[in-house]
């Protein structure tokens, strides 16, 4: 099922900030308009996916013409460049997006027995440590 929400795109010094007023001012950003739109889709899908998982109903989207861009920029203290800021609809099929982007992948790994024993004694969550280490590696690239 397609979900469609209006988003405010604010042109700023180093790219675009994207705000979803109907989702408690959920925000993301991108350096280019294409990147900002891709991030907006991902952000919207993520929020709706977790709302659904928590059994919280989705808020009703506002009509696009009901979004007051100057008022939102003032409330959020965003310096609005009215010539390059705009409201646009962002749509995503949450179930399809989640299956592709939010699924977990099982991996098998090998570590020394002494390290396994020491980590197990400390109740270390192996999956969490591996995710944190991989994120740190990926973000430094």
Image (cartoon, rainbow, N blue to C red):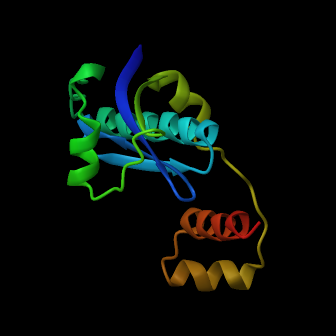
- The relative height of residue 89 versus residue 74 in the rendered view (above or below) is above
Q: Going by the image, does 102 lie left or right of 45?
A: right
Image location (x, y in percent) of residue 125: 52, 69
Q: Which quadrant of the rendered structure holds the N terminus?
A: top left
Image location (x, y in percent) of residue 13: 53, 59
- The relative height of residue 3 versus residue 59 in the rendered view (above or below) is above
Q: Quadrant of residue 23?
A: top left
Image location (x, y in percent) of residue 47: 37, 40
Q: Residue furthest front?
A: 83
The answer to whether residue 5 of the structure is visible from this angle is: yes
Q: Quadrant of residue 114?
A: bottom right
Which residue is drawn at the image coordinates 59% and 81% (left, top)?
Answer: 119
Q: Which quadrant of the rendered structure holds the C terminus?
A: bottom right
- Camera-side residue: 118 or 9? 9
Q: Residue furthest top?
A: 1
- Camera-side residue: 13 or 16? 13
Q: Going by the image, does 141 lie left or right of 2?
A: right
- The relative height of residue 29 versus residue 22 in the rendered view (above or below) is below
Which residue is drawn at the image coordinates 21% and 43% (left, top)?
Answer: 71
- Camera-side residue: 9 or 110? 9
Which residue is drawn at the image coordinates 33% and 56% (left, top)?
Answer: 78
The answer to whether residue 54 of the structure is visible from this angle is: no
- The relative height of residue 13 versus residue 61 in the rendered view (above or below) is below
Image location (x, y in percent) of residue 100: 61, 31
Which residue is drawn at the image coordinates 26% and 55% (left, top)?
Answer: 76
Q: Quadrant of residue 134?
A: bottom right
**Number of dots carrying numbers:** 0
Q: Going by the image, does 60 lie left or right of 141?
A: left
- Camera-side residue: 130 or 93? 93
């Amino acid at each position: 099922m397609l979900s469609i929400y209006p988003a405010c795109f604010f042109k700023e010094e180093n790219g675009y900030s994207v705000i979803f007023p109907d989702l408690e001012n959920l925000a993301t950003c991108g350096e280019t308009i294409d990147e900002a739109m891709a991030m907006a889709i991902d952000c919207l899908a993520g929020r709706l996916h977790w709302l659904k998982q928590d059994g919280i109903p989705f808020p009703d989207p506002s009509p696009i013409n009901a979004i007051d861009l100057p008022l939102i920029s003032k409330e959020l203290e965003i310096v609005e460049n009215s010539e390059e800021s705009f409201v646009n609809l962002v749509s995503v099929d949450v179930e399809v997006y989640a299956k592709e982007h939010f699924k977990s992948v099982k991996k098998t790994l090998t570590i020394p027995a002494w390290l396994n024993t020491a980590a197990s004694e400390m109740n270390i969550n192996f999956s969490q440590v591996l995710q944190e280490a991989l994120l740190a590696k990926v973000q430094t690239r």
